[in-house]
Amino acid sequence: MKKSTLLSVSLAAITMSGLFSTAKADSAEASCQVRKDGEVKQARSGPCTFSQRQGYIDLDLRNGVTYSLAPGQNANHFKDQKGNKVIRTQAGGNTQEFKWEGGTKVIVTFTGTNAGGGDGGAAAVNSGETPADLRDLVNGRRVGGEVDDEMIRRGYRSARNEVQGDDVYSYWRKSSDGRCVVVHFDASRHVSSIASAFESSCK
């Protein structure tokens, strides 16, 4: 192979590595309340850490229990590390609620300390919700650059991109209020989901 060809390949690799940054988790301190099957009264609660990265969520309780949730095919649907189905039944105010198919429920209440970005629990709570001004882009026919153009038209600016397998996660910040969102492109480069993200994700 000629030196010029090798140089071109090397430059392309360096450019691509600069475009896609390493994925990192954003975390927020919270209080987690776990209710077992059939319990209706106030359950015992304690401090925990809520972490989110590209739709994956970890709930680390101080008693050593960890719930690791992987995103499902539908919004707010997950599977835990044992393969059990989990649905996020609430995401608003300062609370998120996760319900297991067997009846167990974990209620996460944010305490206002966001280790990832310093903007408090509010950023954590709203993560995962689709902003109203972007809902029409989800599962639409637009792909790649078309979505980029539309995001810019709606007042967002690109922050960074991450690649995980065949999927691309594109982070955008809204110029007017600083809101951070993540656009998930599937293998065909169609928009799979758009969700609010931690403020630190757009840095």
Image (cartoon, rainbow, N blue to C red):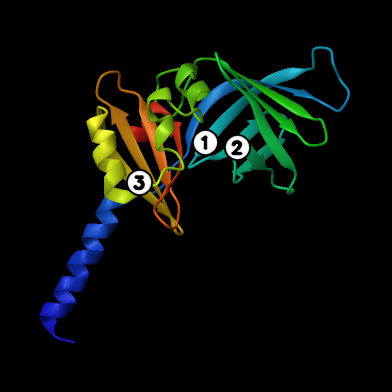
* Quadrant, the N terminus: bottom left
Which percent across, then down, holds residue 67? 68, 38
Residue found 83% across the figure and 27% down from its top: 36
Q: Nearer the viewer, mark 1 or mark 3?
A: 3
Question: Which residue lies under the disc numbered 2?
Answer: 58
Task: Using the numbered discs, state the Cα–Cα distance from disc 2 to disc 3 in whole angstroms.
Answer: 31 Å
Above or below, comparing residue 30 to residue 165 in the picture: above
Question: Which residue lies under the disc numbered 1?
Answer: 52
The kind of residue tagged 2 is: Asp
The kind of residue tagged 3 is: Arg
Counting every numbered tag in the picture gives 3
Residue at the extreme bottom: 1
Please indicate whether residue 125 sits to the left or right of residue 67 in the image.
left
Residue found 73% across the figure and 18% down from its top: 45
SS class, disc 1: strand
The kind of residue tagged 1 is: Gln
Please indicate whether residue 54 sits to the left or right of residue 137 in the image.
right
Which percent across, then down, holds residue 42? 80, 12
Question: Which residue lies under the disc numbered 3?
Answer: 142
Q: Which of marks 1 and 2 is nearer the N terminus?
A: 1
Q: Is residue 137 visible?
A: yes
Which percent across, then down, holds residue 122? 47, 17
Residue at the extreme front: 141
Above or below, comparing residue 190 to residue 101 in the picture: below
